[in-house]
Image (spheres, coloured by chain):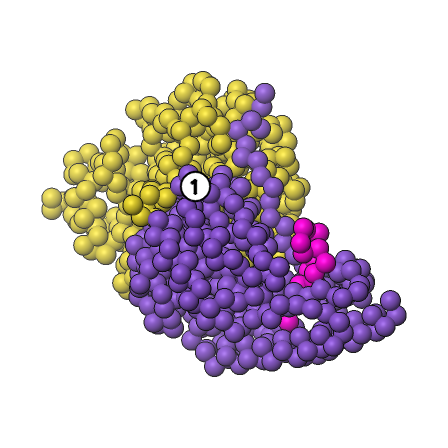
Chain colours: A yellow, B purple
Amino acid sequence: MSWEKNVRRVEPYVAGEQPKAEGVIKLNTNECPYPPSPEIKKILEKMDCGKLRLYPDMHAKELVNALADYYHVKQQQVFVGVGSDDVLAMAFMTFFYGERPILFPDITYSFYDVWAEVFRIPYRVCALDGDFRIKKEDYLSPNGGIVIPNPNAPTGVLEDTGFFEEIIASNPESVVIVDEAYVDFGGESTIPLIDRYDNLLVVQTFSKSRAMAGARIGFAIGNEKLIRYLKDVKFSFNSYTMNMPAIEIGRAAVLDDAYFREIVGKIIKTREWTKKELGRLGFSFADSKANFVFACHERVPAKDLFLALKENNIYVRHWDKKRISNYLRITIGTDEQMEKLIAFLEKYLNEN
Amino acid sequence: MSWEKNVRRVEPYVAGEQPKAEGVIKLNTNECPYPPSPEIKKILEKMDCGKLRLYPDMHAKELVNALADYYHVKQQQVFVGVGSDDVLAMAFMTFFYGERPILFPDITYSFYDVWAEVFRIPYRVCALDGDFRIKKEDYLSPNGGIVIPNPNAPTGVLEDTGFFEEIIASNPESVVIVDEAYVDFGGESTIPLIDRYDNLLVVQTFSKSRAMAGARIGFAIGNEKLIRYLKDVKFSFNSYTMNMPAIEIGRAAVLDDAYFREIVGKIIKTREWTKKELGRLGFSFADSKANFVFACHERVPAKDLFLALKENNIYVRHWDKKRISNYLRITIGTDEQMEKLIAFLEKYLNEN
């Protein structure tokens, strides 16, 4: 016998590849192709480094207040964390502590079952329909909690606020987490519902639409009581999660709304162009409202395309998983990157 | 019935006050009175902010490699996290998953029982002796894991490596965590023991001796197998915990060893002066090897001194807890700050 008998065994989440080579077109982890707000450079340049000797503000007020103002909610309705993964992990730990299984789609963010496993939360996956749509009725039976991304990932499919309102209203005994990592690219947020439903937690991130995956900032917005429970668990885990640079540059990013709208607008435009071109080349896909397209070719298997692209330094994401193994998730990059992708695919499909 | 029945209820850790007023002498949270290495300013000034759009290196290699070189261990023996609290939380989750109670001192870092509670880990506290020394024999009976700070906090009492080696060697069925948050101020690290004992995890932080509480960097060093288990849980929680600024400035701090030794040397010198002066004023205290002194006055109750100091903008730490309610934990500041503290105490004690 050894100490190993006391170890919590888990199968960790596997993130997308992070190739370090130069010249790679990286369309595999849904990062933003544009740099973050230029205000961030100014903040880091003038940062009072002497203050790093002190603990940061444990409530990250500067950042929380900026988010509260931006989303027209109270400070007490905002929770921040080290990326939305940290926020979601804390939320799973806090709100999914019942005995009934939690529910989420079968095709969705692949971290959900990992969190369920690590926290030993029972769960049941609900199959999307043939068009990759969420079947609302699946979420109306007794459960220990619900988590659904909107738009869903990796499908990109968006549902409207009314769809979620019905699920939330039908589940007063469960917390419903709406994971809005990609909502800024064309969706409508459920944030306005938080005052009406005390069981709704909305989670968003700075990693996609705010071009700051490297800063690790995510947040949740919900009813005050919900946020208080979440903070209790967070403050039982780590008092100070947000470091001083993250608080300061996060705030600057929220304040620079014009820049945010500009880059999001560009990505949406590029996405629509990419869809048109992919359609022309024989791809089919749901109508993505995210910063990626989840596409399947009429003739050539996704795995072959994935490998051919990779060999040519274009990285997209492919999963060897049931129902989706013939799909590629292609992040929307710059116009130039997408033109290169389409040109490569066109040539490859003509030759193969 | 509501969703609240599914909530994990906890009593969160309460960190020391973080007064924001100007002119405060802040000796209450064991921060370093000196700024971090001047290299950090340079790193932030020249940071390539465009790269913030990308996810940071999930293995934080630049930082891990610098630590591995510094401590003469392998990269695979190093784990990094968002302050040592994050590292300890992950370690509790990973290694204390058995049925037997874990053990730690009754007077110690007050986060240990909070982590035990949040993760529902059974625990038993072992009373320090009358001189605030850890009784080794308490840690030789069957248990589910052990965590002990060295030097202990808030007592400041240091034990030698041999003391820990006996505990570690006697507990092959438990992981023993040695929390060395304060070891740089005059202790000897147990890191050299990791190759001999695969059940030893050593945890340290950048928040004290490296003057970087605001950057949120902590680390653990242990046997490869142990670190692998810890990483599995961490990667089941959040793939990217260390943001890009933390990785880069953390590395710079490790490389600037001369500066590190300089500030640690100054703090040790100031601590010894402070002890002498406190002794002269009628305080008694264990021989602290940390960046604080845990002191009790022969006549005036600690609570009175705490309040009088606070009223005069000098913050120290006081706990209304059994066995230690007549003690103040005083962080070692600059010479000037400690002279002001002593001058105030001298005047106060003469008048009261």
Q: Look at the numbered disc 1 and give the secondary structure of its residue.
A: loop
| Quarter holding residue B318 | bottom right
- Most frequent secondary structure within the magenta stretch: loop
* Horizontal relation, residue B256 to residue B197: left or right: right
The question of residue B1 being in magenta is answered with: no
Q: Position of residue A52 (x, y in %)?
A: 57, 67
Q: Nearer the viewer, residue A206 or B275?
A: B275
User: Is residue A165 among what the camera can see?
Assistant: no
Identify the residue shown where x is 58% and y is 39%. Answer: B10
Identify the residue shown where x is 46% and y is 77%. Answer: B256
Query: Magenta segment range?
Result: B316-332
Which residue is label 1 attached to?
B100
Q: Position of residue A96 (x, y in %)?
A: 48, 32
The correct choice, above or below, for A139 with respect to B23 in the image is above
Identify the residue shown where x is 11% and y is 44%. Answer: A352
- Image quadrant holding the C terminus of chain B, namely bottom right
Q: Nearer the viewer, residue B256 or A179?
A: B256
Q: Nearer the viewer, residue A41 or B97?
A: B97
User: Is residue B348 among what the camera can see?
Assistant: yes
